[in-house]
Amino acid sequence: MKVLKFGGTSVGSSKNINNVVSILNNYAQKDQVICVVSAVGGVTDKLLEAGYLAQTKNSDYTDKFETIKSIHLNLVKELIPEHNETVLETVTTKLNGLKSLLDGIYLINELSPKTSDKLVSYGELLSSYIIAETLKSRGANAERKNSQELITTNANFTKAEVNYPITNTNIQDYFKNSTFDITILPGFIASTATGEFTTLGRGGSDFTAAIVAAALEVEQLEIWTDVSGMFTANPKLVKQAMPIEKLSYQEAMELSHFGAKVLYPPTVQPVLSLQIPIHIKNTLEPEAVGTIISQDSTSATNTAKGITNISNVALLTLQGNGMVGIPGFSRRLFQTLAQEKINIILITQASSEHSICFGIDEKDAEVAKTAIDAEFENEISLNKIDPILVENDLSIIALIGDNMKSHQGISGKMFSALGKNNINIRAIAQGASEKNISAVIAQKDVKKALNILHEVFFEGNIKQLNVFITGVGNVGERLVEQIKQQRKYLKDNLKINLRVIGLSNSRKMLFNEDGLTLKNWKEQLNEDGIPATLEGFLETVKSLNLRNSIFVDVTANKDVADLYAQYLKHSIAVVACNKIACSSAFEKYKELKTLSYKYNAPYLFETNVGAGLPVIDTLNNLIASGDKVTSIQAVLSGSLNFVFNNFNDTTKFYDVVKQAAAEGYTEPDPRIDLSGVDVARKILILARESGTEMNLEDIENTPFLSEAGLKSDTVDDFYQTLIADEAHYQNLFASAKANKAQLKYVAEFNNGKAKVGLREIPEGHPFYNLKGKDNIVMFYTQRYPEQPMIIKGAGAGADVTASGLFADIIRIGNN
């Protein structure tokens, strides 16, 4: 004998009911089947809404009734298209009874718990009758038995308690003599010994199935729903959630208590003592494995089995010095809540006895505060304790699993993962059994928290990075293409799932919470993007609140740099090739560093110096290992090195600068490069990273541009000065040639001072043969006093700059 239960979604349409009929017929070929069904999906809520409207003298209850009537009559017509007159007549009669009940509620202006139970019972009575008649019309040996004739309860309406001795006898006597292959039972509903209609409360249809399964001591109870079992997390919030193949009864109850909607805790109770397994199956995918709930689930490999949450929680705190060492406070507190019939979800108390913290449903918070403040009115007036503190908009997340107690570090792993994403934990509770570790967090962080924990405990430590890129011009475009090319490699080899969530240029911005495909991202940005604003981009990144979010600045815009602090304060990492922030006032530089540490949000800017070369990373490693920089000598401008490597007495300075700009080696405004400001910023950043407090104006900058070039107002004017002042630049080249030297723009830092300028480099010097757009940096330190540590390579260009940004993103992923 098999006991199966089908929920509201499973019987929510003629298509789904046809699936149920097919499943029942397949089972009936091998065994006798008992099928418990819920009301058609959504009907119970509609019945309650109609009852409320009628009670409040709102005539719209008739519209609700007509909707309910239409749903059931249409089901009959779709499921039993031929010879359905008798069925339609019976369903209509039942619906007329429902209408009369609603009319009565409207007339007397009252909806008591007793009447409410009678009202909602129509949902299961109608669905079970229609499904039974559908089976019969298709030749099945089926019958419907009214559960109200089998399950006897007390008169505690809306949540009646079962009289098991009478109920078990009724069920056993009926099925002992039953000859039907399939018996349909309405779930949720029961009756008192005197025949009054009752209901079994939330999850009552599951409960009905468990009562029947326990009474008949069947081998297994099957709960059929619209998902393939209980999942490791809510799949609506965690897309990577997966079905759990096996759970213990205790694990299932913990998951159910903490919000898993597939199964309700009372369901487990009747079958628990008999150790009857429960199998959760999917009506829409009957072949799916589903979840088996039994006494033993040791075959599972994960230490944790699932992550779940309860939303709309209020956290109340009773605290005060007058509580310390005084017995009775807890008793009075919880007794007060019990008198108000307020359920406590979570409790935690510090060993100092200074405070008691507990979580309740947010809707009960105001009543709880009023009652508790009244109970402790005397102590509050004497300043022994404070008025009860109430915090709203919270949620409880819970990590659950039987095996957690035998593994060290689970709590640390959980809280560390949350902390790295700056999710503040308001309270913690863990029982001695260690099967449930609960934490109270802000409601807005629930989705992020669930995804973080799922990633850590169930996804093989594949870390998801969510990237937002501002500035998809030359360098930004190359970065996006590099990401697109390397995503599979990163996931397979570095366990990094890198997703680009947002893109922006100066005109449009585009977002996709599930990640942009990047296949035709330019077209998507132009066609589907919305008008771009820097604040709008920031607000969208904040509102999405995704874990491991990274903002990438591929601009040279001061306004963008000014927003770094806002990103960091919301635990959003910043990766920048924009040098403005790091070379601004020292206080601003330090503030960003401080915010990065405070909010655990990396702030990386490797490409500020040397593009893709590991200059800053190497310097940081030297400092972190205890070394001290004494001197830095460098050629830090790939654009200037390109210019002076290609300029000679047969070329024109104007043409070489134009070529450098065309190939992307200079800033959009080449004056930034040629004035030495860009190099000054770079040596300033290296000086600061070496531990020296310095500002841009402290750097000695000896310009090589003509006076007219330095005073030019626009980029076009500047280019005109290059043409007019060609002789000035030819004189620079001629002097170097005469001295058998090469022109290089050099940055130096020594003894706390820095300077930049054009120098004639003699033959034999490490800078002499520096070709193309290459950079070179020489670090003299206490460990490298004579032969410096040298870093050399391409220091400009879109590809290498993009690769430097990419490397910073990966560095965050590996953190």
Image (cartoon, helix red, strand yellow):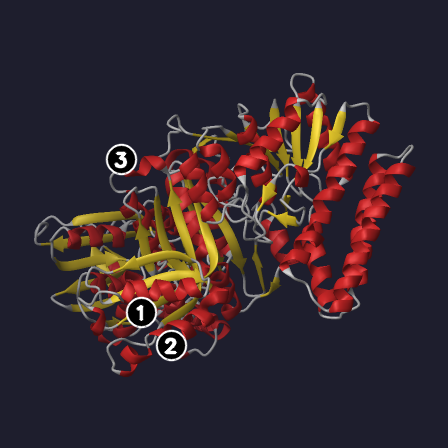
| Residue 652 in view of the camera | no
Write down the quadrant of residue 356 in the picture.
Answer: bottom left
Which of the 4 image quadrants contains residue 222? top right
Classify residue 460 by image quadrant. top left
**Circle 2 or circle 3, nearest the eye:** 2
Which residue is at a point 26% across and 64% down the rendered structure image? 685
Q: Give the Cα separation between the discs numbered 3 and 1.
A: 34 Å
As drawn, which residue projects farthest toward the top? Answer: 30
Q: Is residue 196 above or below residue 30?
A: below
Structural crowding at the residue carrying mark 2, measured as other residues with C-alpha within 10 Å and reported as few (<14), some (14–19) or many (≥20):
few
Q: Which residue is mark 1?
A: 318
- CB under 8 Å between discs 2 and 1: no
What's the amino acid at mark 3?
Ser
The numbered mark, 2 or 1, whose residue comes first in the sequence reads 1
Q: CA distance from mark 2 to mark 1?
A: 13 Å
Relative horizontal placement of residue 443, taking residue 795 as reference (left or right): right
Q: Quadrant of the N terminus?
A: top right
- Residue at 33% across / 79% down in the picture? 377
Q: Would you place residue 443 above or below residue 222 in this image?
A: below
Q: Which residue is nearer to you in this view: 572 or 412?
A: 412
Q: Which mark is residue 225?
A: none
Q: Earlier in the sequence, mark 3 or mark 1?
A: 1
Where residue 622 sits in the image (x, y, percent)? 16, 51
Dot 3 falls on a residue whose secondary structure is helix
Q: Is residue 595 left or right of residue 578?
A: left
Q: Nearer the viewer, mark 3 or mark 1?
A: 1
Residue at point 47% right, 64% down?
A: 362
Q: Could you tell me the amino acid type at mark 2?
A: Ala
Q: Secondary structure at mark 1?
A: strand
SS of the residue under disc 2: helix
**Disc sitting over residue 374 in the figure:** 2
Q: Nearer the viewer, residue 797 or 202?
A: 202
